[in-house]
Image (cartoon, rainbow, N blue to C red):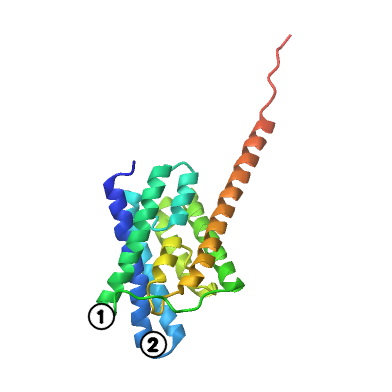
Amino acid sequence: MTRCPALVAELAGTAALLAIEVGSGIMGERLAMGNAAVALLANSLSTGAGLFVLISTLAPISGAHFNPAVSCLFCWRGELSKGDLAAYVAVQIMGAVLGVWLAHAMFDLPILQAGAKVRTGTGQWTSEAVATIGLLATILLGLRTNTKSVPALVACYITAAYWFTASTSFANPAVTMARSLTDTFAGIRWPDVPGFIAAQAAATSFVMATLKRNSAATASSKEDECPTTGSLS
């Protein structure tokens, strides 16, 4: 089973991530005086910087997933047991909610809120699928080439994805659920949450299916290259 420090790291890391996302959205919107581009710039840069710090410091403890999609991928790869996966997802969701409430408290807003921002439609769902596939690919390729580069790669990818996806790249079921609890710049309506999570889940399944096919093809190729052993007369 997962050690307690790993679960604490996932809880604290996810809470910090949501406090950064929601808090910077509130601050950016207040200071931008109606300029949505400036508010999004502040939100994306703050989130990217925060991700770099959180992943760099907490990866040695828990892997710094902060995301059920990432945890599901590592469970599928055999690097996380099913029991550990359930525990990770539970604390990630709990941490995400606590992070939203913390952001509200810091800005003297009502703690309990409901998201009102409309985020639905084919473009939004496609964006979430693209954002999730890109995030998982960034992590996997980063681990394959240079593990130490993963914090920077993920931070840069998410910062960019805020801008090139119509959904502003949630790419995280726990984040999606928690952001339905804030009626601020980062919010999302409850009715729109299932569509986002479905797109994220479909993207995660697609990545795992692709990896499975590639693994099978590689194994088959190696078998074909193996010379047949025969007896010498």
Q: Are marks 2 and 1 in contact (CB under 8 Å)?
A: no
What secondary structure is found at the residue carrying circle 2?
Answer: helix
Tell me what residue is drawn at x 67 percent, y 37 percent: 221
Indicate the position of residue 126 as horizontal and vertical percent values: 59, 68
Percent position of residue 205, x then y: 56, 53
Observer-nearest residue: 149 or 23? 23
Amino acid tagged 2: Ala
Q: Nearer the viewer, residue 143 or 64?
A: 64
Q: Is residue 148 left or right of residue 99?
A: right
Within 10 Å of the Cα at label 1, are there few (<14), some (14-19), or many (20+) other Cα atoms?
A: few
User: In screen coordinates, is 222 left or right of 171?
Assistant: right
Residue 32: image tag = 2
The Cα–Cα distance between marks 2 and 1, rounded to whole angstroms, is 19 Å
Q: Which mark is residue 108?
A: 1
Q: Quadrant of the C terminus?
A: top right
Residue 25, quarter of the rendered image = bottom left
Q: Is residue 102 visible?
A: yes
Q: Please tell me the numbered disc located at residue 143.
A: none
Give SS at disc 1.
loop
Q: Earlier in the sequence, mark 2 or mark 1?
A: 2
Relative to 27, is 6 above or below? above
Residue 20 in picture, x, y percent from top left: 34, 70
Three-letter residue code for mark 1: Asp
